[in-house]
Amino acid sequence: MARRRSSSGSTQSRYFVLRRSLWNWAMRAGLAIAAVVIGGYGTAFSIGQAVVSVNPTLAHRLVPYDGRTTAVYAASLTGPEASAAARAQADALASRALRQDPTAVVAASTLGLDAMIEGRKAIARQYFTYAQILSRRDFKTQLWAIENAVGRGDVRGALDQYDIALRTTARGGELFFPILASANATPEVRAGLIHKLVTRPPWGEGFINYLAGSGLDARPAAALFMGLRRAGVVISPVAQADVIEALINGGFTEDAWAYYASLHPGVDRGHSRDPHFAANTDQPTPFDWVAVNTDGISTSIQGGAVDFTVPASVSGAMLRQVQLLPPGAYRLSGHSLGIVQEAEALPYWTLICGSTGRELDRVDVPNSATGSGRFVGGFKVPANCPVQVLTLIARPSEATGGLSGQFDTVELVPAR
């Protein structure tokens, strides 16, 4: 009897062990299947997110349940040139995207764009306003916000939206700087730009440099820069030089001088500037000494002197400075060091009429051993020559080492 009970108990034990083993295997199999399914969804979602920017159609097929992917697909179907049927399909998809994910900003902006194209302005405003609440980084939404502010005549509001777009759009400068540069010609916009730039936005310096070299009428740019400087904003030397050069090239020499004089209080237009080469600026304006380095000519200004080296048989300009001398007689004087040349290869100073290119006169520079390196000469400026260029010219030299030397003083003043 005892043996039979033992046998029965052993059978029951084996049964429970087998049952537990089967249960474990079933659980493992179920978990494996779940892992495969979840992994499949995860893989599809990952691929969808990876390709959505280049192939929104494929991304939507992979993850049709994802609101943001659906929104991008909807946006790809519409636009100003899309057919009415395509816009209707885009609207249906965008609406579905918002049901899938109420934060899908691209869906809201797509619905807003289509409504605007179809003339449903109130509906467009609702969708774009909602899109702005969701994000300030959607490009279409920011374009609408700018246009909406401009349409209302709200200059400050438009500039606020440009500010947001320039802070958040990767190509903001490329897209919006030309528009703002043109609008700067309007005094009201310029006042608004000054107000905005005083806050030193991250795009401010880039815009200032762009404006200086934009090729537009430089007078509004100079007015903006002067307003910014009065407000304590530092304008880069590159932008200062560019706007002065642009004013001169545009024929606005009086404006150029006024701007230059605001940078250098007390400057006298009847005299050349910086007689002892002490400015040492890396970004000279045309009214400063400008070293010329072309065709092998090497000119540098440093340490209170200008040094120059010219290869044998080479000639050309080495140094120049734009003048706005009133009509009259002028005296040029200076001091050189290290110039040793035959008479026909000695350098000379010339004053050229900027409007015609006509040479008014020349002042030859003797060898530095002559008169202890000092030289003097004169020019007469006629009434029909309001702009002049004082230029140092190298004559071709047959010397093995070419021409070299130094000036530590050069000054052009009214003759007494």
Image (cartoon, rainbow, N blue to C red):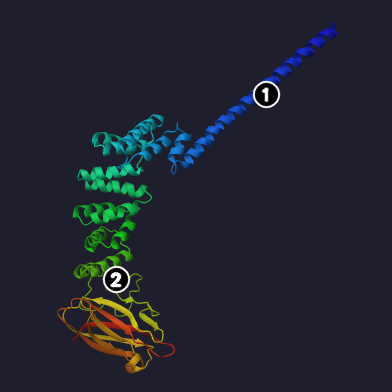
Q: In this rendering, which labeled residue sits more in front, label 2 or label 1?
A: 1
Q: Is residue 211 visible?
A: yes
Q: Considering only vertical position in the picture, is 186 above or below 289?
A: above
**Image point (22%, 54%), residue name:** 191
**Image point (30%, 45%), residue name:** 143
User: Quadrant location of residue 89?
Assistant: top left
Q: Secondary structure at mark 1?
A: helix
Which residue is denoted by mark 2 in the rendering? 285
Q: Is residue 261 visible?
A: no
Measured from the top left, where is residue 55 in percent x and y? 44, 42
User: Quadrant location of residue 37?
Assistant: top right
Q: Considering only vertical position in the picture, is 301 above or below 367?
A: above
The amino acid beneath tag 1 is Trp
Measured from the top left, where is residue 92 in percent x and y? 35, 31
Q: Along the line of sight, which residue is nearer the eye, 298 or 257?
A: 298
Quadrant holding the N terminus:
top right
Q: Secondary structure at mark 2?
A: loop
Q: Along the line of sight, which residue is nearer the eye, 180 or 241?
A: 180
Q: How many marks?
A: 2
Measured from the top left, where is residue 370 in percent x and y? 33, 94
Query: How dense is the environment of label 2, judged by Cα within 10 Å: few (below 14), some, or many (20 and up)?
Result: many
Q: Considering only vertical position in the picture, is 374 above or below 16?
A: below
Q: Considering only vertical position in the picture, is 304 above or below 377?
A: above
* Residue at the far top in the pictured view: 1
* Residue at the far left in the pictured view: 383
Measured from the top left, where is residue 369 in percent x and y? 36, 93
**Image point (27%, 53%), residue name:** 179
The amino acid beneath tag 2 is Thr
Which residue is denoted by mark 1 in the rendering? 25
| C-alpha gap between disc 2 and disc 1 | 85 Å
Quadrant holding the C terminus:
bottom left
